[in-house]
Amino acid sequence: MRWINRQRNILDFTLSSLLRRKGKNVALLAVYTFIVFILASVVFLTSSLKKEACLVLQDSPEIIVQRTVAGRHDLIPISYMLVLKEIRGVQSVRERLWGYYYDPATGANYTFVVPKDHQYGDGGVAIGNGVARTIRADRGDIVPFRTHDGSYMSLEIKEIFSSESEIISSDLIVISEEDFREIAGIPKGYATDLTLYIRNARELPTIADKIKRALPDTRPIIRDEILRTYDTVFDWRGGIVMAILSGAIMSFIIFAWDKATGLSSDEKREIGILKGIGWETSDVILMKFWEGVVLSFSSFLLGIILAYIHVFFTSFALFEPVLKGWSILYPEFKLIPSLDVYQIATLFFLTVVPYTIATIVPSWRAATVDPDTIMRM
Amino acid sequence: MIELINIRKVFNMRRPNEFVAIDSVSLLVESHKITVFKGPSGSGKTTLLSLIGCLARPTSGRIIVSGNEITSLPERFLTEIRRKIFGFVFQQFYLIKGITVLENVMLPAYPLGGKYSSLKEKADSLLALFNISHKTSSRIEWLSGGEAQRVSIARALVNDPLVVIADEPTAYLDTKLSLEFMEIAGRLKKVGKTILIASHDPLVYESDIVDRVVEMRDGKIITREKSCL
């Protein structure tokens, strides 16, 4: 109880002390909060994007088989499915039809996808939020699409959808097989690629190898490879922001170091008084410890909260262009809130702990003076 | 009872600027009395008070407080004794600016871990004792010299020390306030405190409440006299 009271009493005095030097501490709090805000924004965004990527890929097939001609992706004959079905361990094979569509009127690229069971029939499409925003279309509108031979095909918007992750649904147009073949000019008997579901994930490399041997003009893409690519891309983008901000971080470190380590003559005098009236060196250090903790922890919490709002409520408004890529059709980035405890803990140890230590060290030096210094001040 | 046996204090030892502040001082300070150390600046009064009050250690000699030898104790124990036995009133009061009168008075008691409410009660009662209750929530910088001094005395008493040490307490006070200080010292003596004062102010050492005057010069005691007034 005595220990708790001691902490409470000293914390109480620390808070009064902080209020006494309002100017210095508010400036420090503002800069500190800003840096944590920036760092946490990047951390939140990266981890949320990764989560989106996982969502995108959770239902994706274990292997995608694409045909390549001269090293480039080409249409794949559906007859290849027969060969693939024969490979041991393959549970099912399905053809996929999808492609990109460039709309010269808006300058945007859309993604056509043919689902297994298209519920809207020929002539009907479902479009993603991003497409609807770009062409200002609503349910029931008729939209013309240019086909591969230059003629136009009118399709009716039956639904505007949003999925759990807008990154995948934003630029999507779900279309029937007939209509897609007509627009894209893909002949019957061909698909964009083939997907394979495998019984045992451990057999993936072996099956991929067998595919390459059975169908030499194809490339099997394993889901893990896609995941790795996503990871790299998101880390790289996070890295760009970090590189831009490293200057700001460095200035903060210098600022914080200067503010935290430099004791003013008033502060030194105060430490002398405290020692003179019966405080031990450990009491002074405890007071400075609380001062560092209060300041850095408040900034940390404030920065984290602001970053959370920034990333998940304002869709990363400050750094949008850096992270969203080249597409004209920006998804309305409503990211799924995702907190990576490990990363937050890292951020905590990189900001709160060094600052607190930086605050204690000079005070410890000042507090080891003989208490009789006060008699000579 | 405080006993000093052959105390010597040397600053900057074995350096060209070596200075002997206290030289072969032996003294017995009686409890519940007011003892004044008088002498010119540099005579060693302040140094002697800081040695008695465990603020510094002697270079040689022994100090015995209430039967316990304190000179060889580690800093931690020395601080403990300082907190329990001594209360200090400094020359320039050394109150902490920017916080309230109440907080200043409570400050020495914070590390002891007492309950906040009881500390506050204690501080309030001391402020009431010295008629400055109305200034409880004022900031230090708004106080007059006399008020600051009374706050500084209240702070010295918050841990209920047996001995109050005052270093040149009237140096920055006018006659009226100096007399007021001596009146407070008399009240403290009546409630059983031992008061040690370093001063070269005649208002202090000639006061009739003073029991003993110890005159110092060049780090040595030259006379030990009873107050003749």
Image (cartoon, coloured by chain):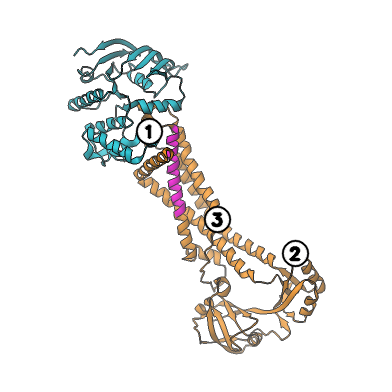
Chain colours: A orange, B cyan
B59 to the left or right of B201:
right
Q: Are marks 3 and 1 on the same chain?
A: yes
Extreme residue toward the front, this view:
A1
In space, the residues marked 3 and 1 are separated at their CA atoms by 40 Å
Q: Mark 2 highlights which residue? A: A202
Q: Mark 1 highlights which residue? A: A274
* Magenta span of residues: A281-301
Picture coordinates of residue B99, whole percent (x, y): 31, 40
Q: Nearer the viewer, residue A263 or A222?
A: A222
B184 to the left or right of B87:
left
Of marks 3 and 2, which one's residue comes earlier in the chain?
2
Which image quadrant: the N terminus of chain B? top left
Picture coordinates of residue B147, whole percent (x, y): 23, 34
Picture coordinates of residue B114, whole percent (x, y): 37, 37
Instruction: Inspect the image, locate mark 2, and give the three-letter code of the amino acid beneath it.
Output: Arg
Q: Are marks 3 and 2 on the same chain?
A: yes
